[in-house]
Image (tube, rainbow, N blue to C red):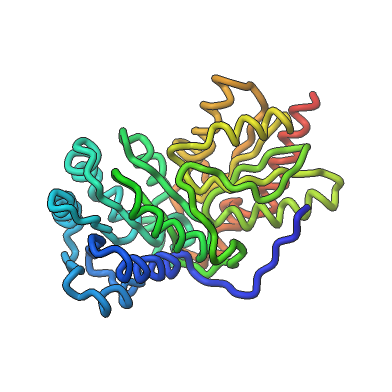
Amino acid sequence: MKKYTFTEKKDTRSGFGAGMQVLGQTNPNVVALCADLIGSLKLDAFIKENPERFFQTGIAEANMICIAAGLTIGGKIPFATTFANFGTGRVYDQIRQSVAYSNKNVKIACSHAGLTLGEDGATHQILEDLGMMKMLPGMTVINPCDYNQTKAATIAVAEHEGPVYLRFGRPVVPIFTAPDQEFIIGKAWMVNEGADVSIFATGHLVWEAILAGEILAEKGIDAEIINIHTIKPLDEEAVLASVRKTGCAVSAEEHQIAGGLGDSIAQVLIKKHLAPLEYVGVEDSFGESGTPAQLMEKYGLNAASIVEKALKAIARKQA
């Protein structure tokens, strides 16, 4: 098992803020919109350096999406920002009609996704957003794993032509990817090569997958761990190459099992290479109030659950 260490923890939303600051300095067409959550989205540096390129829409998310769509007509690259629940669920009709249907170059960048929003509870903890957004024709969906990858993804998203949903989070998590990494949309990242089971993880669950790989290694199991930072378009080549080698797989995500990364992987496997697949995710449930750590443990979004599902997948392969 390849060893990954970290010296610092940071929230992925701060990686977005750092990426936006770089874009403010390097791409004059990038503009930002926010629905009254500047601090939460870490936009302070961008706004300070580019006040004329920021639009405060207030708590009017539907209006923000429509303004962003309009700005693209003049050649701007708008990043519409808010909490994930408000930026997808509350405004799905506006995204579908004004952005996706007309293929507008809008970047919907949302923080506080998943259970790790924490104490704000179920009304704010959207666990359906990846599924909702990936179902929209032409929508690219990205869910990076740490501060550095979120920063790199933000910069890459601005260069991509077409609508994008960029998802990131509130809690501090280990920084374990390279600060100078190249982020390629649609290209999975091989975290650890292995032979016994494929673990496909996204977002905050990538670090948990690494911890799970270390536990499995102690049991004599060689896990292949792949970071699927781009949910759509899915890197089908990477999925198939890995599962053809290992013969079984686990998906791990901070999202409902229904409609998430695991569903996308299952579609690939059922069409092109049948193999046992186990899921780590939220099982048809809303969240609740609690610390991120408490919630991740209660809902089984951690290394222990990934190990359990990996062992189950291996047993099914051998049956």
Residue 40 seen: no
Q: Which residue, as the protein is rendered here, is positioned at the far bottom?
A: 48
Where residue 146 appears, x then y in whole percent? 53, 62
Q: Residue at x 59, y 41 (%)?
A: 251
Q: Is residue 209 left or right of residue 286?
A: right
Q: Is residue 303 above or below residue 276?
A: below
- Residue 30: name its quadrant: bottom left
Which residue is at the front of the view, 116 or 267?
Answer: 267
Where residue 37 appears, x then y in whole percent? 28, 69
Q: Residue at x 18, y 51 (%)?
A: 72
Where residue 47 appears, x then y in whole percent? 26, 75
Q: Residue at x 32, y 36 (%)?
A: 138
Where residue 93 appears, x then y in whole percent? 20, 42
- Residue 188: name its quadrant: top right
Q: Is residue 60 above or below residue 99?
A: below
Q: Classify the position of the C terminus by image quarter.
A: top right
Q: Is residue 281 left or right of residue 215?
A: left
Q: Is residue 51 above or below residue 311?
A: below
Q: Residue at x 32, y 71 (%)?
A: 25
Residue 183 seen: yes
